[in-house]
Amino acid sequence: MNFQESLDYLYGLQVFGVKLGLQNMQALENRLAALRAQVPCVHIAGTNGKGSVSTFLAEILRHSGLRVGLYTSPHLHCFSERIRIDGVPLSHERIASLAEQVRRAAKDIPVTFFEATTAIAMMAFREDDVDIAVIETGLGGRLDATNIVRPMLCLVTPVSLDHREHLGDSLAAIAGEKAGIIKPGVPVVSGLQDAEAAAVLLDVAFKNRSTVQMAGRDYYRQGTHAALEVRGPDYVIDGLSCGLPGDHQLDNLAQAVAAAMQLREQGVPVTDEAIRLSGRTASWPGRLEWWRGARQILLDVAHNRAGISSLADYLRHEGLLKVRLVVGMSGERDPSEVLMPLAGIASQLHAVPVSQATSVATDRIVLWGLGQGITSLSHALASEGLAAARQDACRDEPVVVCGSLYLVAELRQHLMEQDCAAATRDAVLP
C-alpha cells in the first residue's frame, strides 16, 4: 500500500464505528510481535487537557535527551500528526508499511479505525526503539484500545461530562471509566478534579495499591505564564514559562512537571533544564490559537462545558467581552449545556455544520443563541459562517471559532489556503 491507500483502508474501518473493548487489540497483540514487545510508556486519560499534558511531557522527556514516542488523537490536518517520534510525525511511507502489516494481521478481526491506528503507533515505537512513549487514550480508558499497554506511570487529566452516550451519565461513572487505566502498583498523577471524580480516582488507586499525586493536594502551581513555579512533596521547580495561552495550560504544564518528577523517581533521567524548556517549546495548534498572531480570529477546539468555560475565562481575562462566535458541534452534544459560559460574551453567533463528523443541527444552535438574546444565523457551510462573521466584526470584536476539533481543522485549513492564494496573487502582481 502507498500512503493514500493506507488512509483509504484505515478510514474504511470507520464502518465499524466506536467499539469499546479490548478483544480486538488482544487478538492483534497475539499476531504482531511488535505489539507484544512494548516500550516503557506513560498512559494518559481524562476529559480535557490530555493532548496538552501529553505534549508538555513529551517535550520534557525529549529535552532530557530521550528518544520519545507520542501518540495523540484526533489530528487537525494530517493523519501522521497522531504518531510522532522526537516531535516528528511518522513518514507517510512508514505509515503505509505498518498499515499493511495491520491489515494482514486483522484479516478476520473487525478492527476499528482507532484500534488499527493504535496498533500502528505502538508498532512504530517498538520498531524505532524509543526510550519511552507518551500514549493518550482515545475515548474513556477502561475499554479504550490503548489500555493494553503496561505503563510505568498513569496520568488522569481533569474529568468532566462528555461522551455520555459511551461513558455514562454521571461524573462518577465517567471518572470510573477514565480510572480504568490505573494498573496494580503503578503510580498515578492526577490533574485538578471535582470532588466526585477525585473520590472515584482515589478509590480505584487504593484498590490497585497505586500511589497518587493529586493537583491541589500533593503538588501545586503558582505564578504566571512568564514566571511559573511548581511545588511537590520534595521538589520546587521554578523559572518555568508557558507559551500556550490560557490559565488551564498552566495547570496542564504543572501536571506534566509532576509526572516528570515521578518518572525521575523511577530512574528516568529527567533534567530540571528540560522541564524549564518544555513550556517554551511545546506547540499545540488550534488551542486558543490566534490565527497568524493577529487578534482577529481565535481558534479553539473546546467542545464540552469544561472546555468552553476555559475559553470564556480566557476571553474575559484578555478583556474581550464582545466576540462573534462561529460554532459547529458534533455528536450528541446539547448546545444549551455546552455553550452557556459564552452567553454573556457573544454579540453574534454563526451556527455552521461540521463536515467531517455527525453534526448537531445548526437550527438547535441558533435556537440556543436566540434564547440568550444573541443575534444568531445559520449557514450551510462553515466557510460561509466564518466569512460572514469576519465581514460583520468590528475592530474590537474578534471572531471566535469553537465547538468541535473537526470545525477548527476545517476552518484552519481554509485560512491556510486563503493565505496561500493571497501570497500567490501578491507574487504575480507587477
Image (tube, helix red, strand yellow):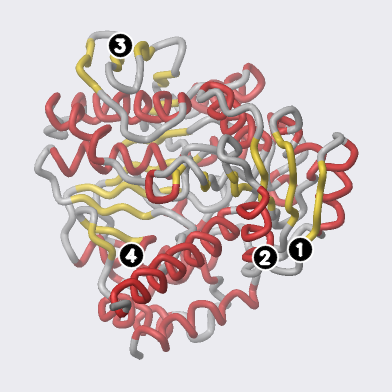
Q: Are marks 2 and 1 in contact (CB under 8 Å)?
A: yes
- In the image, which is nearer the foreground, mark 1 or mark 4? 1
Q: Are marks 3 and 2 in contact (CB under 8 Å)?
A: no
Q: Nearer the viewer, residue 107 or 12?
A: 12
- In the image, which is nearer the foreground, mark 4 or mark 2? 2
Q: Quadrant of the N terminus?
A: bottom left
- In the image, which is nearer the foreground, mark 1 or mark 3? 1
Mark 3 is surrounded, within 10 Å at the Cα level, by few (under 14), some (14 to 19) or many (20 or more) other residues, namely some
- Residue at the (79%, 44%) spot, across then down: 335
- For marks 1 and 4, give the CA distance: 46 Å
State the residue position of label 3: 231
Q: Position of residue 420 (x, y in %)?
A: 38, 70
Q: Position of residue 179 (x, y in %)?
A: 54, 35
Residue 92: name its quadrant: bottom left
Assign a secondary structure to mark 1: loop
- Residue at the (67%, 50%) spot, across then down: 392
Query: Would residue 108 appear left or right of 338 to someone viewing this image?
Result: left
Instruction: State whether residue 334 is above or below residue 214.
Output: below
Instruction: State whether residue 264 is above or below residue 98.
Output: above
Label ID, residue 35: 4
Disc with the residue nearer the chain's start (4 vs 2): 4
Instruction: Please name the amino acid that badge 3 sits on.
Output: Arg
